[in-house]
Image (cartoon, rainbow, N blue to C red):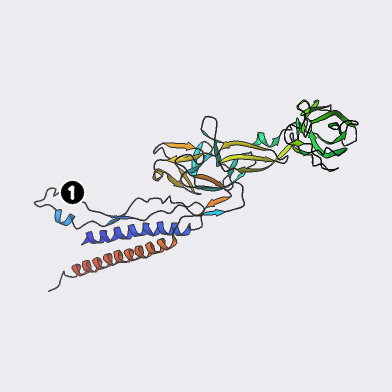
Amino acid sequence: MLGAIFTGLSGLNAFSAGLQTISNNVTNLNTLGYKATSTTFSDVFTYGGGGLTFYDNKGSASLGNGVRFDATRVDFAQGDLRQTSGNLDLAIQGSGFLVLNNNGKTYYTRTGQFAVDKDGYISLQSDTQSRLAVLDGSGKAVALNIDAQRTSKPTPTTTIKFADNLSSTATTDSIADVAVYDSMGGKHTWTIKFDKVSGSASDWGVTVTDDTGATVGTSTLKFSGSTVDPTTQTLTINSSPSGADPLSVVLDFSSGVTSFSAGTTSTLRTSSVDGNAVGALTTVTIDAQGHVVLNYSNSQTQTLGAVALADFRDPQQLRRVSGGLFVNDGNGPTRVVASQTEGVGQLLSKQLEASNTNLSEQFGELILIQRGFQASSQVVSATNDMIQQLFGIRGQG
């Protein structure tokens, strides 16, 4: 009968562990990226042979020795994806894990809220030592530092492209407020004026002036019929801005410029002007391909490495630690690839993965475990009553 008490106690211990697992799942209902843990039990039978006895105990062993709480199994099913406003709020649609470097240690997570920390690393807001890893040139996952890219260098203007119609029956036209940049990032505002050459039906004098009204350069634009004469499709204007390198800007009329009759109204415009001033880093984002993109105040962008995603043959071998992080204790190989590579899902920004805890399922399991614990306690109680009755036999009769 003492064995029955231990059998009942095994139930109490197993169901207590199950209750702890379920309570942990339920309390993490709103924990970002949390993966629920299963509750499973198995029966226990032991048989050690008869030893130095004249009989074996196969019959008693077949009665069983109770129950035990099995090793937990993490449910890696996809949680709901929730929209956010954070550019560096990241989640994965599909399989895979984000890779984090933390003082020489590597951690893995399904989702996280990231920000650029004071040292220039993209790190978890909750733990700035956990830094988001990207793929370097050799395909290794390394922490990314953007301090060296906080400023976008100036680029001098080299080409101004034009489009649309310069009316053949007009006598003058001008395009104002054309922003041109020198090698130091200085901005120069040009006005480009077109005047019909006297005595010619197809030649135009081109005069470029700066914001002070001073002439920067002159040239001649010619048309052959309604199209630009091939010899003047590109005109070069040279300038020597103070404190910067000499500026040589090509006026490009080779694509889409016409000269049809349109009265005195022309629609000639600049279609593009290259060059830019110095820019300061404004935002860090992740593009649709999973690359880190730096955006600057001068409208320039710079694309850096792809965010590293880890793929495991058996994610169950990962060990869970606090903060939604996992570690790989060397149980199986780790494959580190970019977003949407075969075997991993797509990295999404401005989204976070919610807990995959199924509340109704957990409450159902909770009732069953409660009943199992109650029944096991009754076994212990009933066995104790029987032992008390056995002790009471002495002295009777």
For mark 1, give the secondary structure.
Answer: loop
Query: How many numbered circles are shown?
Result: 1
**Label 1 Cα crowd, 10 Å radius (few <14 / some 14-19 / many 20+):** few
Which quadrant is home to the N terminus? bottom left
Which residue is more in the foreground, 156 or 285? 156
**What residue lies at 63% left-to-right and 38% top-to-bottom?**
120
Q: Please identify the residue farthest to the left as the structure is shown.
A: 54
Which residue is more in the foreground, 287 or 316? 287
**What residue lies at 40% left-to-right and 56% top-to-bottom?**
21
- The residue beneath circle 1 is 48
Residue 328 in picture, x, y percent from top left: 43, 40
Residue 159 in picture, x, y percent from top left: 75, 31
Residue 353 in picture, x, y percent from top left: 51, 52
Q: Please identify the residue farthest to the bottom as the structure is shown.
A: 397
- In-image side of 49 versus 211 (left or right): left
Query: Which corner quadrant of the image does residue 193 belong to?
Result: top right
Amino acid type for the residue under numbered disc 1? Gly
Q: In the image, is residue 105 above or below residue 322?
A: above
Which quadrant is home to the C terminus? bottom left
The answer to whether one can see residue 329 in this image is: yes
Which residue is more in the foreground, 134 or 229? 229
Residue 373 in picture, x, y percent from top left: 33, 63
The answer to whether one can see residue 242 in this image is: no
